[in-house]
Image (cartoon, grey):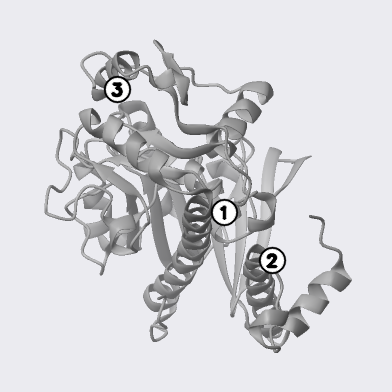
Amino acid sequence: MKWEPEKIENCLHALTLPIHHQCQHQSLQRIHEIRWNRKQNLHDFEIPEKKLRIVEVWGKAAIGEYLWKHIFNGSITNKIDNRGAVSIGFNTINDIKFKYLSGPGIIQQNVGEDSENVILILNGRSSDKIKFSKTWLEYLLSLQRLRNVAIVMLGNERCDNEWLYKYVRDNRYKVKIVHLVYDDTKIDQQTFYQWPLGVATYRGFPRFHLLQVDAKSIRRYICNFLGTVYNNSTRQKLQEIFLKNSLNDVCYSNFRQRWLPKETKSSSLWYQKILRESDITLCPIGFNSETYRVYEASSLGSIPVIEDVVSPGKCDNNFDSPLRLVKKLKAPFIYIKDWSELPTVIRNENALSNIEKIERRKHLLDWYHNFKIYLRNHYVNTIKESFFRFPSMSAE
């Protein structure tokens, strides 16, 4: 369904009418999003530009795009200027004007001279990425006007992030807060916070709005898995379960034997199509229990089936691990301990009516939509508290 501006306005009016006059479920969710953005924009419009607090976001890792596009709902302009190829965006939330800077043209020689407040997006997953991240952290010492730094980092999949902690302890680096991907034991909700892995923006996975997802049609597949099978991994067992139980009759699978870092346009569209056409998406452990497909499936209404097992390494192994953040926010996922449970999951799926699947799908889409709003409110609040000492507003 295509929504014209006047139809949106009619639905906005309908929100004041009795429930039987209101518009469709998905449309209302989109309207709430529009209203939220309008409220932000109206509030921002009332604040003189000179009173806005400027916070720069330096995107030196792909998860910066998830923060900017998917959580902040920001847009990005790609251009060539005297710095080279750069990606730039602006987004004002409340009384903070965020400026996004990324791309190969954003190097230490041409950013930071006048910067006071910086969000630094880093990748700490491997030794080469850590080495690169350290150069940016050391660069902070040379910035004379710098007052506040926040870090958002794709952590190591085994939660081996000790190298970062010295930059947080040393006041010279001005690091006030850190948001880390994966269940690191350092998360204390004071200096260290948990951040979701999100979708694979480095592969070009797009942002979907609720109106772009068909929640009502019968889906072709019960389940799907597209991914790499690592040696001695539970993905090997999953592949064996598929063969033993002839699951290819009801599920789509593509078990690759080697990892493919790059995505073609056609392969990306095919992957999105499979998610759109599947009731559930299987999410086996890779090198960590948290995988991109958890969030990619959620964005397209396919219930993630999570392997609820803590992966090897130094990650937290308390009762609420793994994926503490989504569990805290009551994600409507399916959790299993072993892939031998999959045939039972499939039988349970077969027992559901189409109406039950539709309601469950809507619930997932609503949850993911609200999850991103929660993250946006939470993140802006932590910046206001740690950078500007504003009192906290609830992000619930």
The residue under label 3 is 238
Left of 91 or right of it: where is 283?
left
Q: Residue visible at 72% across and 81% down?
A: 21
**How many neighbours does mark 2 have within 10 angstroms: few (below 14), some (14-19), or many (20 or more)?**
some
- Mark 3 to mark 1 CA distance (whole Å): 31 Å
- Mark 1 to mark 2 CA distance (whole Å): 19 Å
**Residue 141 appearing in the image:** no
Q: Amino acid at mark 2?
A: Ser
**How many neighbours does mark 1 have within 10 angstroms: few (below 14), some (14-19), or many (20 or more)?**
many
**How many neighbours does mark 3 have within 10 angstroms: few (below 14), some (14-19), or many (20 or more)?**
many
Q: Residue visible at 50% across and 58% down?
A: 359
| Number of marks in the rendered image | 3
Q: Is residue 391 above or below residue 7?
A: below
The label shown at residue 59 is none
Q: Amino acid at mark 1?
A: His
The residue under label 2 is 27
Left of 277 or right of it: where is 251?
left
Helix, strand or loop at mark 2:
helix
Which badge, 1 or 2, is on the more N-terminal residue? 2
Q: Judge depth for marks 3 and 1 and give the one in front.
A: 3
| Residue closer to the observer: 124 or 349 | 349
Q: Is residue 347 above or below residue 100?
A: above
Q: Estimate the x, y position of residue 290 in percent, counting from the top left.
A: 32, 41
Q: Estimate the x, y position of residue 48 in percent, counting from the top left.
A: 71, 85
The residue under label 1 is 70
Q: Estimate the x, y position of residue 237 in percent, counting from the top left.
A: 24, 19
